[in-house]
Structures are given as structure tokens and as C-alpha cells.
């Protein structure tokens, strides 16, 4: 799960260059994944 999170942050980094709409989408998606991962730990 942590590897998946790391992978999506890499995707976020590469998508910042392309378009601001995709950047917002990936930021939201990564935040959601992080929250889900945090809940699983607890």
C-alpha cells in the first residue's frame, strides 16, 4: 500500500507539468489514498 502511495506521488510529480486540472485531480487522489492508508494503520 505504501509503495502504491509512493507510485501515485511520482505520477503527481509528472502530471504537474501537463495541466493544472490534472494536478488538482491527482492531489485529491493522493490525499484520499493517504487518508485510506492512515485509517488502515489505525
Image: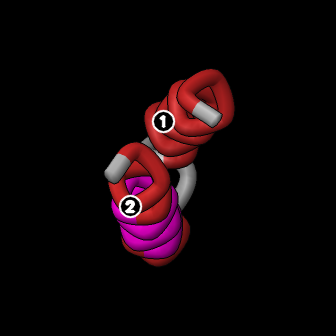
Residue in the picture at 49% in, 43% down:
12
Circles 2, 1 touching at the beta carbon (< 8 Å): no
The rendered magenta stretch, by its main secondary structure, is classed as helix
Q: Which of 38/21 is in front?
A: 38
User: Between residues 6 and 22, which one lies in front from this camera angle?
Assistant: 6
- What is the crowding at mark 1: few (fewer than 14 residues within 10 Å), some, or many (at least 20)? some
- Secondary element type, mark 1: helix
Distance Cα–Cα, label 2 vs label 1? 19 Å
Residue at (63, 29) in percent of width and height: 7
Q: State the quadrant of the N terminus.
A: top right
Residue 28, image quadrant: bottom left
Q: Is residue 30 magenta?
A: yes
Q: Is residue 27 magenta?
A: yes
- Residue at mark 2: 39
Q: Which residue is mark 1?
A: 9
Observer-nearest of 4 and 11? 4
User: Is residue 20 visible in this depiction of the protein?
Assistant: no
Counting from the top left corner in percent of width and height, residue 21 is at 47, 76
**SS at circle 2:** helix
Residue 33 seen in the figure: yes
Q: Which residues are magenta?
A: 25-35
Which of the two discs, 2 and 1, labels the residue nearer the N terminus? 1
Where residue 33 appears, as percent x and y from the top left, is: 50, 58
Residue with the most extreme front position: 42
* Position in image of residue 18 (x %, y %): 56, 51
**Quadrant in the rendering for residue 11:** top right
Q: Quadrant of residue 3?
A: top right
Q: Is residue 4 above or below residue 32?
A: above
Amino acid at each position: 500500500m505504501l509503495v502504491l502511495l509512493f507510485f501515485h506521488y511520482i505520477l503527481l510529480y509528472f502530471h504537474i507539468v501537463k495541466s493544472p486540472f490534472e494536478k488538482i485531480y491527482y492531489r485529491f487522489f493522493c490525499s484520499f489514498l493517504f487518508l485510506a492508508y492512515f485509517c488502515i494503520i489505525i
